[in-house]
Amino acid sequence: MLERNYDKYLHIETSKYSETFDHSNVHYHRYEPTPYSALQVLFEHHKIVSSDRIVDFGCGKGRLIFFIHYFYQATVIGIEMNQSFYESARNNSLSYIRQNQLVKHDNIHLYHCLAEGYQINENDNKFYFFNPFTVQIFMRIINNILRSVEKNPREIELIIYYGSDDYVYFLNYQTTFSLKQEIAVPILVDSNPYERFLVYRLG
């Protein structure tokens, strides 16, 4: 499917650019949705099942969570600190549910909070990051995840798109996560080596 057709197909609006970023918070980066073409590549090589619980930190208008929910029926959790983007995600959720009434929708969850303030659910097992904040915030969230795993041991995977060198260094040298998979986005990666997904597994 062409990039421009996905929003229409899912009955959401995530493509229009809107400058509502809070520049006063230096730890959080400007929101950009993951290209649909990149999501296609990711899920051609990385398996998602309906029993998964995927948390998207910095979900913006919700593109990733509605894509995963529609095509894989997994539980999705969107975390967004920006009020405007959160409201857009809520509106998208209402439109998505209204137009897809035959699809189970009680497993779509949106939270308006700082990423590090999200309480990790004992069943959350996949965590998505598209370079949403500095490594300092990232480290706090990883520690939250590790504390959750101590209480409820389970397999955990991190999916990182456009991962910064700081993220990679931290995971490789200061945690027990190990790189399981590297998925390059064809064509885009030729001109930018960060156009790739890194999948880390705990243990």
Image: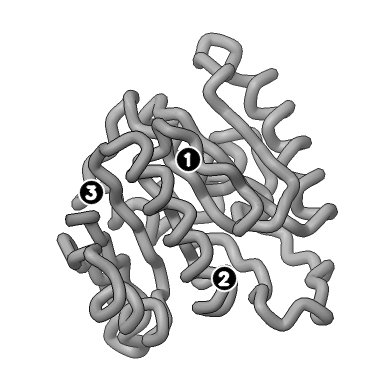
Q: Which element is circle 2 on? A: helix
Q: Nearer the viewer, residue 113 or 75?
A: 113
Which residue is at a point 34% across and 32% down the rendered structure image?
52
**Quarter-wise, where is residue 168 in the image?**
bottom left
Amino acid marked by disc 1: Phe
Q: Nearer the viewer, residue 49 or 45?
A: 49
Q: Which element is circle 1 on? A: helix
Which residue is at a point 58% across and 17% down the rendered structure image?
106
Amino acid marked by disc 2: Ile
For disc 3, the marked residue is: 46
Residue 4 x, y percent position in the rendering? 55, 53
Residue 153 disc label: none
Left or right, 167 with respect to 134, comes to left
**Quarter-wise, where is residue 93 in the image?**
top right
Q: Residues within 10 Å of mark 1 (few under 14, many from 20)?
A: some
Q: Is residue 100 above or below residue 22?
A: above
Colour treatment of the image: one colour
Q: Nearer the viewer, residue 200 or 90?
A: 200
Q: Is residue 93 above or below residue 130?
A: above
Residue 67 disc label: 1
User: Of the residues tagged 2 and 1, which is closer to the observer?
Assistant: 2
For disc 2, the marked residue is: 137
Amino acid marked by disc 3: His
Reading the chain from its start, which is encountered first: label 3 or label 1? 3
Q: Disc 2 and disc 3: Cα gap in Å?
A: 26 Å
Q: Disc 2 and disc 1: Cα gap in Å?
A: 26 Å
Labels 2 & 1 near each other (Cβ < 8 A): no
User: Of the residues tagged 2 and 3, which is closer to the observer?
Assistant: 2
Residue 185 visible (yes or no): no
